[in-house]
Amino acid sequence: MKVAVLAGGRGTRLMAGEASHPKALFEIGGRPIIWHIMRYYAAAELRDFILLLGYKAQEIVDYFVSRLPYEGRDLRLQVGKSLEPEFLDSGPEAQWTVTLFDTGQDSEKGERIRRIRHLVGDDEDFMVTYGDGLADVDLRALQRFHQSHGKVATLTAVRARSQFGHVEVAADGAVQEMRENPMLPDWINGGFFVFRRDIFDWLEPDDPLETGCFRRLAAAGELMAYRHEGFWACMDTYKDNLRLNELWEQGMAPWAPWRDA
């Protein structure tokens, strides 16, 4: 099963002003977050990747060409020019197949997915994930859930923590309880999708995915949610990046089961 990673983001909230490199290359423990995401999928024996590039696409290409060990036959570059890098045949990444595809600098997420129809091939199902999210989702259980219901699309629903402390106040103004960063009650879209190939029939040009395609699927009863109660984090801000780096340094990174293997 192929795994498409949305890696076209700018990372504008990770630093003041325009980001110096793509969001997918911001590091955790000295490695880009996109590497962490791919290692997580690879740990579940999902190693056939399509990276949907956008902002500063060439920098992601350069990272994969010059810094990661791949067998040459497994790295297919589709960003508008042919490169002939030297590859090292070592390390776990040598088992990956990676297609790098430029889906446009400012394309909507749905449009990025729509443009890789020819790369998915004849696979009935394929996975998609955001290039800034980490979790300890059971990817095989997610896959089984998707196959069990027969609908077009499955998203992973997660619970997020509040960014602020919550105060419970009585009618007379007395503070009854204070909770620091409590878990919010509602489910949110955590990424980690599984799609049937039929998804391409639901995607429209310049589709924003969440407010476009997903709404149409939900209205038709073709969108299901796999509930995940475990760890989930999004690297959306500088504070998020610091927290994820702290977890990594403390050896408390739930998305990295390979560290204990």
Image: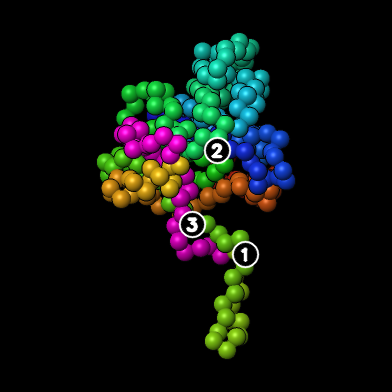
Residue named by callout 2: 131
| Real-space Cα separation, disc 3 to disc 1, in angstroms | 15 Å
From the top left corner, tell me how far across and down residue 75 is, in percent.
53, 18
Element assignment for label 2:
loop
Out of 225 and 82, give the one closest to the viewer. Answer: 82
Q: Earlier in the sequence, mark 1 or mark 2?
A: 2
Q: Residues within 10 Å of mark 1 (few under 14, many from 20)?
A: few
Question: In the image, is residue 258 above or below residue 234?
Answer: above
Instruction: Decide whether residue 192 is among the magenta residues.
Output: yes
Q: Is residue 211 left or right of residue 172?
A: left
Element assignment for label 1:
loop
How many callouts does the rendering have?
A: 3
From the top left corner, tell me how far across and down residue 79 is, in percent.
55, 20
Residue named by callout 1: 164
- Indicate the amino acid at tag 2: Gly
Question: Which residue is outermost to the front?
Answer: 205
Between marks 2 and 3 in the image, the one whose residue lies nearer the viewer: 2
Q: Is residue 258 left or right of residue 111?
A: right
Taking the spot 62% from the left edge, 64% from the top edge, the residue there is: 164
Taking the spot 44% from the left edge, 28% from the top edge, the residue there is: 115
User: What are the residue bounds of the magenta stretch?
Assistant: 182-207
Residue named by callout 3: 159
Taking the spot 46% from the left edge, 50% from the top edge, the residue there is: 189
Q: Earlier in the sequence, mark 2 or mark 3?
A: 2
